[in-house]
Image: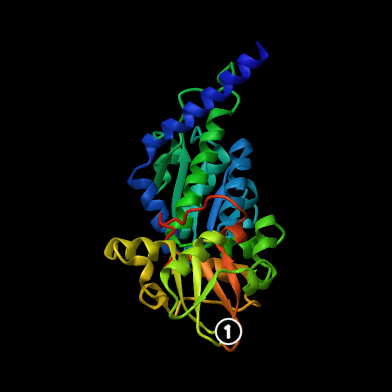
């Protein structure tokens, strides 16, 4: 009975979240645009369980690049209202929309002039009538057997807050390096704050060929090292170009009969993006994401090859795909 009941609770809450997709409409878009167009902060307020959810949403927004604070309704009415300005976007959270302390505060917030949004499950409530933007977080029932304890409703509020934060990440073009800066103690942050030279393949263990070499030799190098690329160097070991899996596919499509006899100079991408060993990994990750590449040559101050850096060695082994969808090396 215990296991079945636990599964029932999870199913009810999961269904509640899925049904929220019906509630994503132009109002959600209006809220995102209001936040992106604001020069102030996102201020979130609520009481009780909704207040706890609001604090978590604030924490997520802050960590993903949106300046945000939590304001307790009672504290606001007793002095903390001074932190609200007309440039802010204010989000009130109340499932019933009839939280007296919150509804007492909202007209004052509106008079200040900032955009006022509400997360509520009651679109006909007092709170709903005051707000400029309404986000419907209503659920059919709580997971509580008495349909009283905030369970499904708070889960829905939290999920909607996560949806808001993630959409803002995309809208604001918040990068992994930005995330690293706000998470210097995290595993990802610690890794991205390392230097390129600490994890790169050194030149002695990286695939390279000289200019004028045949594509047959280049393919042997690519197959041997399995890094998806081979560096092209001159006799002084200065970087001249790079050939990637994508370059090979494109060229083979146009030169099917004599591909292996072509020189690497005809296939390579000249003047590829490169970094030096003292660069931070977050710089490398930014460059890779910007240009949709997975391999970077690492060179010294004279342009001579020092090594090769692969995306998987920054993030850890395993599959990875940029937000743009592709992972061609160009």
Q: Is residue 98 left or right of residue 184?
A: left
Front residue of this view, candidates 29 and 240 = 240
At x 55% / y 43%, what residue is drawn?
102
Considering the image in quadrants, where does the N terminus appear? top right
Front residue of this view, candidates 322 and 19 = 322
Q: Can residue 209 be seen in this view?
A: yes
At x 46% / y 64%, what residue is drawn?
219
Q: Is residue 159 left or right of residue 182?
A: left
For residue 100, above or below residue 225: above
Count of labels in the image: 1
| Residue 294 percent location from the top left of the image | 50, 63
- On the image, numbered disc 1 is attached to which residue? 304
Label 1 neighbourhood size at 10 Å, few (<14), some (14-19), many (20+)? some
| Residue 66 percent location from the top left of the image | 53, 59
Local secondary structure at mark 1: loop
Report which quarter residue 33 is drawn in.
bottom left
Front residue of this view, candidates 143 and 322 = 322
Q: Is residue 87 left or right of residue 23?
A: right
| Residue 118 percent location from the top left of the image | 46, 44
């Amino acid at each position: 009975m215990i296991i079945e009941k636990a599964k029932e609770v999870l199913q009810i809450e999961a269904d509640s979240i899925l049904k929220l997709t019906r509630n994503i409409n132009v109002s959600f878009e209006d809220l995102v645009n209001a936040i992106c167009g604001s020069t102030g902060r996102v201020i979130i307020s609520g009481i009780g369980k909704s207040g706890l959810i609001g604090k978590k949403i604030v924490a997520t927004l802050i960590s993903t690049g949106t300046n945000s604070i939590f304001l307790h309704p009672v504290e606001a009415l007793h002095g903390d209202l001074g932190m609200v300005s007309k440039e802010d976007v204010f989000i009130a959270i109340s499932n019933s929309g009839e939280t007296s302390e919150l509804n007492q505060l909202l007209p004052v917030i509106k008079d200040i002039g900032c955009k006022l949004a509400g997360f509520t499950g009651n679109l006909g409530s007092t709170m709903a009538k005051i707000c400029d933007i309404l986000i419907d977080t209503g659920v059919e029932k709580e997971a509580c057997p008495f349909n009283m304890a905030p369970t499904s409703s708070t889960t829905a509020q939290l999920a909607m807050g996560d949806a808001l934060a993630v959409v803002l990440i995309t809208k604001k073009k918040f990068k992994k390096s930005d995330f690293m800066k706000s998470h210097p103690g995290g595993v990802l942050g610690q890794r991205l704050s390392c230097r390129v030279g600490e994890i790169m393949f050194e030149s002695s263990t990286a695939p390279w060929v000289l200019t004028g070499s045949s594509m047959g030799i280049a393919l042997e190098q690519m197959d041997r090292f399995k890094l998806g690329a081979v560096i092209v160097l001159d006799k002084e070991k200065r970087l001249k170009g790079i050939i990637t899996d994508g370059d090979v596919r494109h060229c083979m499509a146009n030169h099917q009969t004599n591909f292996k006899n072509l020189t690497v100079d005809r296939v390579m991408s000249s003047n590829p993006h490169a970094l030096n060993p003292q660069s931070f990994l977050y710089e490398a990750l930014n460059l890779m994401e910007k240009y949709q590449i997975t391999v970077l040559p690492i060179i010294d101050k004279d342009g001579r090859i020092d090594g090769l850096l692969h995306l998987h060695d920054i993030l850890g082994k395993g599959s990875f795909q940029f937000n743009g969808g592709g992972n061609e090396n160009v």
